[in-house]
Image: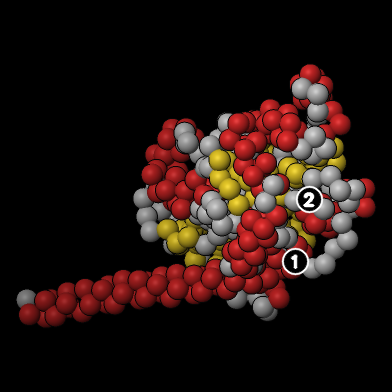
Amino acid sequence: MRIALASPYDFATHGGVNQHIEHLRAEFQRLGHEVDLIAPIDGADEVNERGFHGFGGIVPLPVNGSVARISFSPYLRGRIKDLMSREQFDVVHCHEPLMPALPLMVLRYSRTVNVGTFHAYSETGRGYYYWRPVLAHFHGKLDGLIAVSEPARDYAKHFFPGEYRIIPNGVDTSAFTKPLEPFRDLMDGRPNLLFLGRFEEDRKGFKYLIKALPWVKQVYPDVRLVVVGAGDSSKYRDRIRRSGIVENVLWAGRISDEDRARFMASCQMLVAPSTHGESQGVVLLEAMAAGLPVVAGDIPGYASILTSGQEGLLVPPESEQALSVAIVRLLADPALRARMTSCGVRTATEYSWPKVAARLLEFYTEIRDRKIWVLGRAERRKHLHVVLNRKAGRRA
């Protein structure tokens, strides 16, 4: 099968949707399929290499508490039109298919089976609300609809009704289950909490974790919060100093994928205090695969994959008190952490990329067969109409 995977986001920038696409490409290729990527790319006007079609004109766009880097090149329309005319794809799979502007152009000029995966979840949906009359046309060009979680499905379905299949984000379980040496500096007997993500974004709830840490420190004076992720930590340093937790926070900065797993092997739990805007939470699945219990904000995206009391604990968002209580509870109960570890590993295996890719390929085939049948029925009706008209003409 010849498959095109299209992303709206700059492929030179690290992000969840692009990671999702890269894992899918690798898994599909492993199974013998030919896969092309279509995406914006910073630093180039246009790239046409074997298996990758990149388009420049990158601009930042505020989206759901974050910043998306998308292509708004004036040449995009013509170049996408040429690409879709030139290539003969069996399936075109657009991720965030209603995001401007690349997926919309791909859908406009695609003449094959079109599938769209909706990744996002938001409490407001202003973009969909105001642009719904325009986007409805492009939504109608999708033959198959996918959402990565129930919250993502409900969000998309509220504005664009249809039959959505839930096929989640995957996780590279092999990267987190293989034996890795922990960081020696962190193996000094201190309890380690791991925060992993873009801590500068308000929706990640990092400030509530900083507020909770002094409460945890009262019970565990040597507790250490390991903060992994790129960003400017200076905005938090005054608060950390005033709270007396300077020695309890370690800033690790941006890290490699291998070190990501090593940090998980070096900590007692992952803390993900996000307050909103998460459609699923891949980092939670990664932590489960690595054997880490999770303390997370009780928001729809996280609750769709984590059952409180099984793989970890869900706490009310924006509550440093509830967060601190949950952290202390897990630190104080190694047996509970061990049970959550076992449960989390089992849950994570259900989200492995081979299983996700197999479900997607099955969906592609189902949608393709359905489209062929619908087109065939239309042709049969057209033929019957011609025959009846001929008979009516002979009788006249």
Q: Nearer the viewer, residue 254 or 318?
A: 318
Q: What element carries label 1?
A: helix
Q: Dot 1, how many residues are within 10 Å of its Cα: few (below 14), some (14-19), or many (20+)? A: some
x, y (%) of residue 320? 62, 31
Residue drawn at the location 82% of the way across and 53% of the way down: 266
**Where's the C terminus, which quadrant?**
bottom left
- List the residue tagged with mark 2: 267
Residue at the spot of label 1: 177
The residue under the point 37% across, 71% down is 375
Relative to 318, is 265 above or below?
below
| Residue 315 appears in the picture as rendered | yes
Q: Which mark is residue 158?
A: none
390 displayed left or right of 24: left
Q: Position of residue 371 (x, y in %)?
A: 41, 70
Residue at 88% in and 61% down: 181
Q: From the image, state whether disc 1 or disc 2 is nearer to you.
A: 2
Q: Is mark 2 on a helix, strand or loop?
A: loop
